[in-house]
Image (cartoon, rainbow, N blue to C red):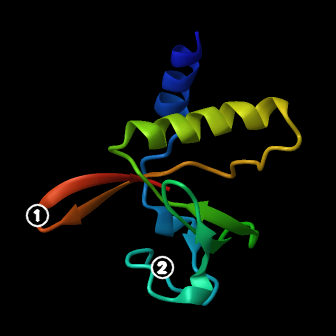
């Protein structure tokens, strides 16, 4: 049952569009790789860095955690967190989940944001 709920999140909640259409860094930059400025980084979690962004539509400041999409642990982390936030007011709310496809040296790699 839990696996089915996680699969449902990956299929229906995860957005597969360009993150920069909705979010930008606080200084207006639309680039998210590489994270070279320390003022952009809020901290580091177990699986990735956490950075501050602004939603261009709502102007709301959010924290984004970048996770490697090819990691089973990352997929588990984000889907379990999404499920936990629905029933617990003390769990940080997920604003959105993006699957960005990045190209490195001609190879395609996924990344969850």
Query: Which of label 1 and label 2 is nearer to you?
Result: 1
Q: Residue furthest left?
A: 106
Number of numbered discs visible in the structure rendering: 2
Q: Quadrant of the N terminus?
A: top right
Q: Residues within 10 Å of mark 1 (few under 14, many from 20)?
A: few
Rendered image quadrant of residue 62:
bottom right
| For residue 77, above or below residue 59 | above
Q: Are marks 1 and 2 in contact (CB under 8 Å)?
A: no
x and y, in percent, of residue 44 in the image:
57, 66
Looking at the image, which residue is at 58% across and 59% down?
Answer: 45
Q: Nearer the viewer, residue 28 or 73?
A: 73
Q: Residues within 10 Å of mark 2 (few under 14, many from 20)?
A: some
Looking at marks 1 and 2 on the same chain, the residue that comes earlier in the sequence is marked by: 2
Mark yes or no: residue 45 visible. yes
Of the pair 79 and 72, the residue shown nearer to us: 72
* Mark carried by residue 30: 2
Compared across the picture, whether 99 is left or right of 101 comes to right
Q: Residue at the spot x=69%, y=48% of the render?
A: 94
Location of mark 1 (residue): 106
- Camera-side residue: 41 or 13? 41
Disc number for residue 52: none
Reply above or below: 113 against 88.
below
Residue 57 drawn above or below residue 88: below
Residue 31 placement: quadrant: bottom left
Q: For the point 45% across and 79% down, which residue is it? A: 35
Asked if residue 28 can be seen in this view, the reply is: no
SS type, badge 1: loop
């Amino acid at each position: 049952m839990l696996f089915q709920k996680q699969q449902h999140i990956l299929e229906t909640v995860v957005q597969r569009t360009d993150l920069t259409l909705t979010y930008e860094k606080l200084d207006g930059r639309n680039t998210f790789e590489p994270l070279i400025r320390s003022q952009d980084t809020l901290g580091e979690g177990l699986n990735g860095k956490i950075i501050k962004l602004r939603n261009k539509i709502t102007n709301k400041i959010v924290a984004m955690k970048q996770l490697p999409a090819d990691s089973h642990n990352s997929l588990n982390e984000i889907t379990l967190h999404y499920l936990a936030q629905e029933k617990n007011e003390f769990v940080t709310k997920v604003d959105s989940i993006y699957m960005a496809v990045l190209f490195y040296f001609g190879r395609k790699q996924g990344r969850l944001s």
